[in-house]
Image (cartoon, grey):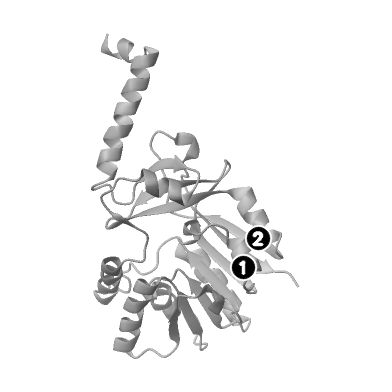
Amino acid sequence: MKNIIKQIPFVKRYYQLYKEEQYKSRFATDYYGCFWGVFNTFDEAIQAAPKVKSFGYNNEELAQEYQQMLEDNNWENQGRSIFLYDYPMLFWLSSIINQGNTNIFDFGGNVGVHYYSYTKYLSNTTLKWTVCDLPEIIKAGKRIVEKRAIKDLEFTSEFADIKSKDIMIAAGVIQYIENLAKKLSTTYKPQHLLINRVPLYDGEQFVTLQNGGKVFYPQYIFNKTEFIDGLINIGYELIDIWEGTGSCIIPFHPDKSVYSYSGLYLRLMN
């Protein structure tokens, strides 16, 4: 009888709203890494978010946490520095470097996690590695570099510093900016793009909200064809695409969920 009542249209809708509010309440607290909502813009997502945390990565407490994780060797030892989704990146990065391309622009590279985990698997070629991230994050990255006396890792908060770089790598970050193709076409186009852990699917582009623990992150979910075509239209060709670990499951919106993130290698056509 209880299940029959739930199928009455107005009861069904009320029960759905109750479940959504219940999830939103939990999402606001301990649902680290989970997602909530479908929105048109970042501003819309931020306005609708629970008012219990700040927004975005430019957070001093978060930066200190990243620094501590690296200094505790959680990203370097214990066999955890390279994940399944890293292998296609390393495969193509090694090939590109062997062709003489050694200037790397690591967009959204955090405190240098890719530098520390990737370089020990690459050739002995001297690399010039530049991480571009938000000011609070790069402060922490610079503290680590100074402590370890590292000479070939630099930090910047300016995307314009991509100029003259051979390779751009971007892992798990492109969903936090609006239009990569426009950003590249109005700044500088490196010869090689290695993009990893980006949510692509076959529906319309939208914004959702992620619980990042200490903060909330609004992020895009991109239409796969539009995203790739945007880069092709500014002169790139798609060399490889792969599926990796990671997903964006949005409760109550199964048609909007992405069950496997994607990686891509694109090369600038001459």
Q: Where does label 2 land, which residue?
A: 231
**253 left or right, relative to 101:** left
The quarter holding residue 17 reads: top left
State the residue in front, 3 or 137: 137
Residue at 26 percent of width and 12 percent of height: 2
Q: Quadrant of residue 27?
A: top left
Image position, residue 261 (x, y; %): 48, 52
**Compared to 141, does 78 lie above or below?**
above
The residue located at (43%, 54%) in the rendering is: 245
Mark 2–mark 1 contact, CB under 8 Å?
yes
Which secondary structure lies at badge 2?
Answer: helix
| Residue 22 left/right relative to 205 | left
Specify the amino acid type for callout 1.
Answer: Leu
From this viewpoint, is residue 74 visible? no
Residue 5, compared with residue 104, is above or below; it is above
Query: Which quarter of the rendering shows the N terminus?
Result: top left
Percent x, y for residue 203?
Answer: 57, 40
Q: Which residue is mark 1?
A: 184
- Number of numbered callouts drawn: 2
Q: Quadrant of the C terminus?
A: bottom right
Q: How far apart, in angstroms, are the residues tagged by discs 2 and 1?
A: 9 Å
Mark 1 lies on a secondary structure that is helix
